[in-house]
Image: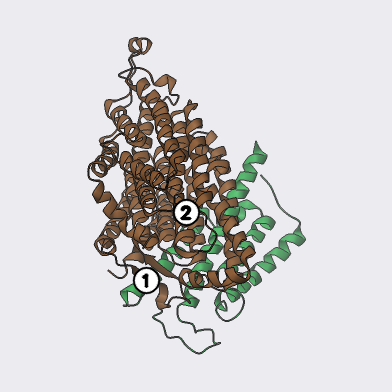
Chain colours: A green, B brown
Amino acid sequence: MRRQETKIVRNVARKLFPVLVLFAFYLIIYGHISPGGGFQGGVVLGSSLILLYLSEGPERVEKKFKNSQLAILEAIGVLTFVGIGFLGIILGKHFLGNFLPIGRVGMVPSAGLVLLLNLFIGTKVGAGISLIFYALMKFDRRAQGE
Amino acid sequence: MSNFPILIVALPLCFAFFISLLSLTKLNRFCGHLALLSVGVSFVLTLCLGPRILAGEKIAYSLGNWPAPLGINLLVDGLSYLLSLIFGLLVLLSVIYSLEDHKGKYFSLVLILYAGMNGVVFTRDLFNLYVFWEILSISAYILVVSPQPASLRASLLYLFLGSLATALFLLGVGIIYALAGTFDMDALAREIPVIWRTQPLAILLVGALFLVSLGIKSGLFPMYVWVPEAHSLAPTPISVLLSGAVLKIGIYIFIRLFLTLFRTEVSLEGLILYWGLISMVFGGCLALVQEDLKRMLAYSSINQVGLILIGIGLGTKLGMEGSLYHLFNHALIKGSLFFSAGMIIESTGKRRIRELKGNGIVPFFPRFSFLMGALAIIGVPPLNGFISKWLICRAAVERGNLIVAALILIFGIVAAVYYLKVVQNLFSVAKMCQTEKRQSSSIPWIKYTCLGTLLGGSLVFGLLPSQGLYLIREAVALIFP
């Protein structure tokens, strides 16, 4: 099935994609000192993939970002999150207890675990949003095909 | 030992995602065993907490070393321990039961459901309670879907009503946060009476929102529509979990919020009593006319939840004891009833009560256990249902509420009518079916062990009621010190 947008849309989307990814990581990494955070950044990450999907068509995008890879990424995001929580217990603190240096207020490498946790939440949410979108689009394509 | 509360919640969660990772690989068939392992470990950890909880201790745990009003806290006390015990047992048996029939993602969802249940009962943070409740509800919505096409509709209905319930609950939580500025339950318990003096209407609104949402989730009279649909069409182990555990979450949250935390001048006892009464009458009457076996069990669940609420609504210590004991017993009995109904349906391929006639179609053990479960839930003496019904009835009499006591007894008889109708069909010899040689599909022995455990449990707790009452003593002491 062919579904390709016009050249303008595809070009703009292709140029926009890296910027969106950068913005997503900005939101994730600055989550603990400014508005943003893992979930928000993850949603932007997912929507950047959605933009690519809508402009380039399903085949090319699903070849580059495979469904199974995204599923693995999603599971790894959660597992690492819980793993960091357990690391806190192993190092003699409570679950999710902070074991990293706290750093200076306002700097990016500060607030101990929060930055790391945000990163993994971002991974999980980004992969999750894309997976949901894939599933919905598959449903849509099947409905159209019938 | 001090980390046990969080391990009980986090281990299944961790394994759930590990299993979803594993289900993508070639080791797909080990998902069930891994789920069994993690539920088993979690259940054993729950059991390990037992001696300390039953001695009257409360085990608190603060996540990330943040103390009470700032961070999220977990607390295991008598009430949450009782519920966690029920959940652990039922989830363990359901996983064992579904080892052969399901694979992959199914187990991952069951584990998320289990983590959510334990999270709801352990947490001391109102918002966190909402989050865990939503986690467990969402996995329950998905798990309701079985190969039968009608189950999709049931799942969607459950999804819509369930989301309405959790949305109302969230609204209530938001209003409380706007008023009190904290989610911590201990802090709220101090704040609410103060706010009550200045803004009683707001608190009443929150109470109403919570009540409606809990009513939907525990399948009380006007909002029960999802219960028969979801219970009857879900896979057997999920029916067990829905009836035995998920319906009980609503009752737990009710007790936790309204009886141990937010004690205001408005007494809810009358409301709860009559609500429970209507639910009981309604569930019982509708169960009488059901033709589908599992649907009948679902209406019977509405009936029994009504009975549990009556015990709470009586507002005495004895009533609460009876209620909590019935909550525990109902989980055991309904578990065994749903398991045996599932086996009967599985071996004969028939769901309608009328079609179950004929000796020899159904293997003996499911028939026998259905009989035992029916007797237990009707309230025949050596079994556990009798003890809790007796306690609730006695509490009603002591309260001078003879009509309630009489109604409980009458609906015991109604329950006898609709259960014994099935039993009669199961044990009768139909002449037409005998000529028809039917090869009933054999049931693996591991499924029998699940059924046997629950039956044994209902016999033990019927013969030794002091053991069961010992389990719930700490929970009751929390409400009536």
- Mark 1: give few (<14), some (14-19) or many (20+) Cα within 10 Å: many
Q: Amino acid at mark 1?
A: Tyr
- Mark 2: give few (<14), some (14-19) or many (20+) Cα within 10 Å: many
Mark number, residue B130: none
Question: Mark 1 and mark 2 in contact (Cβ < 8 Å)?
Answer: no
Q: Nearer the viewer, residue B181 or B47?
A: B181
Describe the element under mark 1 as helix, strand or loop: strand
For this orientation, the residue located farthest to the front is B400
Tell me the quarter of the image containing the N terminus of chain B. bottom left
Q: Residue at x 69, y 68 (%)?
A: A15
Is residue B100 among what the camera can see? no
Q: Position of residue B282 (x, y in %)?
A: 52, 35
Q: Position of residue B151 (x, y in %)?
A: 52, 37
Query: Is B184 left or right of B98, judged from the image as shown?
Result: right
Query: Is B443 left or right of A124, judged from the image as shown?
Result: left
Query: Is A76 left or right of B372, judged from the image as shown?
Result: right
B311 above or below B417? below
Q: Which residue is mark 1?
A: B61
Q: Please tell me which of labels 2 and 1 falls first in the chain.
A: 1
Q: Nearer the viewer, residue B245 or A10?
A: B245
Q: Amino acid at mark 2?
A: Leu
Q: Residue at x 28, y 60 (%)?
A: B45
